[in-house]
Amino acid sequence: MEDCIFCKIIAKQIPANVIYEDEQIIAFRDIHPVAPVHILVIPKKHIASLIDLTKEDEAIVGKIYTVINEIAEKEKLNERGFRVIVNCGEDGGQEVKHLHFHLIGGKKLGTKIVN
Ligand code: DGP
């Protein structure tokens, strides 16, 4: 999608610290990390948000979780754990309108998931 910042990262039109890539998925470090490890894992297909997910996207979402697990292992998060967050829509605080999974870890995270 033309004016989507994550599509531009996928197309290598803007730089990112890419740590994983295959034909369907790309993962890169968040530009504003909230923890020592903060990685965004996204489908290359432009899906605007979780609300826009359809049955045909089920496989890619399953694969994203497998990739998250692989990245977590490489980042040495598997022993102590980590958090995966998907912000969705206006009330969910989604800023970038391209479905993305935040992989956050490397420190003890707060127990509150809403505020
Ligand atoms: P969300 O609020 O869930 O839409 O999170 C969007 C995240 O994307 C936010 O943590 C900052 C990150 N982000 C925004 N623009 C860029 C960018 O150009 N590069 C990178 N690496 N991350 C970005």
Image (cartoon, rainbow, N blue to C red):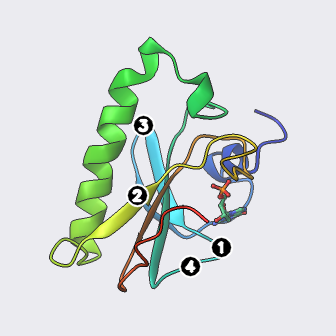
> Which label is found at residue 75?
none
Q: How far apart are marks 4 and 1 (CA)?
A: 10 Å
Identity of the residue drawn at 36% across and 43% down: 64
Q: In this view, does 95 lie to the left or right of 31?
A: right
Crowdedness of circle 1 by 10 Å Cα count: few (<14), some, many (20+)?
few
User: Tags 3 and 2 in contact by the CB under 8 Å rule?
Assistant: no
Q: Which residue lies furthest to the top in this view?
A: 55
* Ligand 1, image quadrant it occupies: bottom right
Q: What residue type is labelled 3?
A: Glu
Name which residue lies at 84% across and 41% down: 3
- Residue matched to label 2: 84
Q: Residues within 10 Å of mark 4 (few under 14, many from 20)?
A: few
Callout 2 amino acid: Val
Helix, strand or loop at label 1? It is loop
Q: Viewer-nearest of labels 3 and 2?
A: 2
In the rendered image, the vertical position of residue 33 relative to residue 55, given as above or below? below
Q: What residue type is labelled 1?
A: Ile
Q: Label 2: few (<14), some or many (≥20) within 10 Å?
A: some
Label 4 within 8 A of ligand 1 by Cβ: yes
Nearer the camera: disc 3 or disc 4: 4
Whichever of labels 1 and 2 marks the residue nearer the N terminus, that label is: 1
The residue wearing badge 4 is: 34
